[in-house]
Amino acid sequence: MALRIAQWTLDVHDLDLMAAFWSAALGYRVDRGDDAGAKLYPPDDAPPDVLTVWLQRVDEPKRDKVRGHPDLRPADGDVDAEVERLLGLGARHADVGQTDDDPFVVLADPEGNEFCVLRNEPRR
């Protein structure tokens, strides 16, 4: 028996800001709960194994580079256009020691949480 990743959970300060960013970035819908959090659901036509996202409100600040982060791929494969779209949504470039030759672009969301946009499929 093996596990599968079902959900990505992210601690956030500004729930509204982060729900707006990540729902727009991923094309997910937002469901605000009664527990100071927000669940982001993929489109209804997404395959059943597509992750949900849980944004969990916390008070403590982000201190260092996030040790676990999502690696994302644009649906149409156009990494440069997707990076520009994400920057327009409020992401920024982040330097975590990567080089220009690395097959990914490192960005940070509006609260500084790093994530990557991959230039290649990870299963190759």
Image (spheres, rainbow, N blue to C red):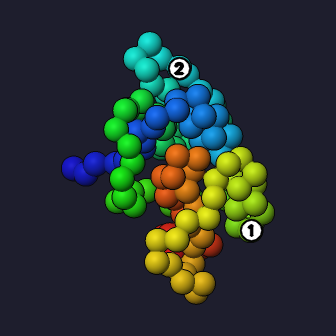
- Report if residue 123 is visible in the image: yes
Vertical relation: 34 (above or below) 85: above
Which residue appears farthest toward the bottom when viewing the image?
101
Which residue does the numbered mark 2 point to in the structure image?
Answer: 32
Residue at (56%, 37%) from the top-left corner? 18
State if disc 2 and disc 1 touch (CB < 8 Å): no
Give the structural element (helix, strand or loop) at label 2: strand
Which residue does the numbered mark 1 point to in the structure image?
Answer: 80
Q: Amino acid at mark 2?
A: Arg
- Using a 10 Å C-alpha cutoff, classify the residue at mark 1 as few (fewer than 14 neighbours), some (14 to 19) or many (20 or more): few
Q: Position of residue 105 (x, y in %)?
A: 60, 70
Q: Amino acid at mark 1?
A: Asp
Q: Position of residue 61 (x, y in %)?
A: 38, 43
Vertical relation: 107 (above or below) 95: above
Q: Earlier in the sequence, mark 1 or mark 2?
A: 2
Residue at (40%, 17%) from the top-left corner? 35
| 67 or 103, nearer to the observer | 67
